[in-house]
Amino acid sequence: MSGSGTVYSFVVVHHVVTAGFPPDVPYVVAWIELPEQAALRILSNVVDCPTGDVYIGQQVEVAFLDVAADFSLPVFRPAS
């Protein structure tokens, strides 16, 4: 996979309701559309960007968030 994508839809979370999710609110949860196939999307976070700057159609690239010694989650940041 290329690691690139486009913000298809998103929501800004202001309250943590489930243990284990980022305690730093607000944060963005987004459907990221991947270019490898039509309608191929992944649900992830948009990081390294103020929540008010995220928009539908925004180009993003994958990054990885280390959550444990042997486990990383794909997240996305604005494309450079």
Image (cartoon, rainbow, N blue to C red):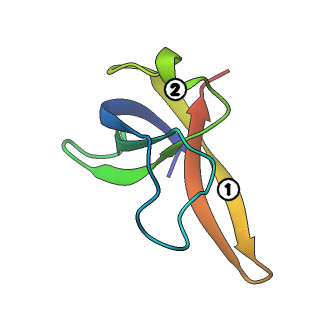
Label 1: which residue?
A: 64
The kind of residue on which mark 1 rests is Phe
**Residue found 32% across the figure and 21% down from its top:** 56
Q: Look at the picture and state if 17 lies above or below 20.
A: above
Left or right, 9 with reference to 7: left
Q: Separation of disc 1 and disc 2 at Cα?
A: 19 Å
Q: Look at the picture and state if 23 lies above or below 76.
A: below
Residue 60 coordinates in the image, percent (x, y): 52, 30
Q: Which mark sits nearer the N-terminus, 1 or 2?
A: 2
Tag 1–tag 2 contact (CB < 8 Å): no
Q: Look at the picture and state if 20 lies above or below 13.
A: below
**Residue found 56% across the figure and 42% down from its top:** 76
- Look at the image and tell me in which quarter the C terminus lies: top right
**Residue found 56% across the figure and 50% down from its top:** 75
Foreground of the two, 48 or 59: 48
**Neighbour class for label 1 at 10 Å: few (<14), some, many (≥20)?**
few
Q: Secondary structure at mark 2?
A: helix
